Amino acid sequence: MEIVSPILTPFNSDGTINKEALKQHATNLLNKGVDLIFLNGTTGLGPALSKEEKKENLRVLSDLSNKIIFQVGDLNLNNVIELIKFASDYDLRAIASYSPYYFPRLPEKWLIKYFQIIASQSRHPVYLYNYPSATGYDISAKLLSKFGLELAGVKDTNQDLAHSMEFKTTFPKMKVYNGSDTLAFYSLLSLDGTVASMSNCLPTVFKEMKEAVARGDARKAMTFQKLITSLVEMARKYGQLGSLYVLTEITQGYKVGGPRPPIFPLDETESKDLRTEVENFLKGLGVST
Ligand SMILES: O=C(O)C(=O)C[C@@H](O)[C@H](O)COP(=O)(O)O
């Protein structure tokens, strides 16, 4: 049962990556009980990072690499292969990739071929990052099974937990995580864990939820899930990916810079309103974040 944090990428105002903030944030998350870091994911604005920036993020966290799932997805497969080769010297938990996107009506066999090529190039275990609402394609357990492609793991970002569980029943050895914050409790209960964006700003809440699940205290675990879901709802009002930078600064007490376009920082009023709402909400609960 693992908490995987799809770590945000801290950007400076000039659009460069704040390496010190990334290292500080990753170290803090792991110290607070996050089990693994999912690097260059959606929350990390992976699709908005260059190949070189994806590499740089791994270099910055090189001493934590045994705790990293390194996301390498790109529409240019040459870049993906270069990233895989670059990462071969690192002690990674896994390589991961979202599926091809943007291009319409891709045949199933082309989608599978993308992952077959990745698997053939990687010395590390390969995880599928399945995010149908973001990519337009559902790389399901049925599809993998149809083509006989068994990957080491999957992060299935899906509101349908049964869809995630089908990976587990089809491929019992596969590591299966669900990537939706609002299903984190159920993912800890029924899968190998959760990959949750809100773990960036609530690492201790996730750790305590995991501990409650482990000791069979579903009621307590559910209170943590409700807290997480409440913060997701607050964040979504202003754009979750941009809000997360403000939420992390509020709860963790250090700056993590801001996002990169097309994800924009909250304006002053939005930041102030979000801060007021979150601080008032957390004040009454007496929880550690
Ligand atoms: O940021 C990543 O790489 C994640 O896994 C989390 C990602 O799956 C995303 O935050 C999920 O959000 P929704 O459930 O789509 O709101």
Image (cartoon, rainbow, N blue to C red):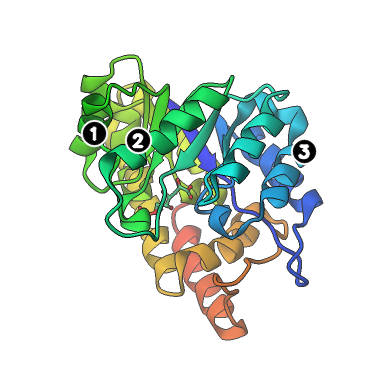
| Mark 3 to mark 2 CA distance (whole Å) | 30 Å
Which mark sits nearer the N-terminus, 3 or 1? 3
Circle 2: element type: helix
Please name the residue that numbered disc 3 is placed on.
Answer: 59
Q: Left or right: where does residue 233 sit relative to residue 167?
A: right
Which amino acid lies under the numbered mark 2 shown in the image of this protein?
Ile
Q: Residues within 10 Å of mark 1 (few under 14, many from 20)?
A: some
Of the two numbered discs 3 and 1 in the rendering, the one whose residue sits closer to the viewer: 1
* Image: 258 above or below 198: below
Residue type, mark 3 in image: Arg
Query: For the residue with label 1, is its CB less than 8 Å from the closest atom of ligand 1?
Result: no
Label 3 beta carbon less than 8 Å to ligand 1: no
Q: Work out whether residue 125 or residue 273 is closer to the camera in this orientation and state it.
A: 125
- Spatial distance from mark 1 to mark 2, Cα to Cα? 8 Å
The single residue placed furthest to the bottom in the displayed view is: 269
Is 56 left or right of 130, judged from the image as shown? right
Question: Could you tell me how many numbered marks the image carries?
Answer: 3
Please name the residue that numbered disc 1 is placed on.
143
Q: The N terminus lies in which quarter of the figure?
A: top left
Residue shown at 34%/14% (left/top)?
173
Residue 239 lies, in percent from the top left, at 46, 70
Instruction: For the residues labelled 1 and 2, say whether their Cβ atoms are less than 8 Å apart.
Output: yes
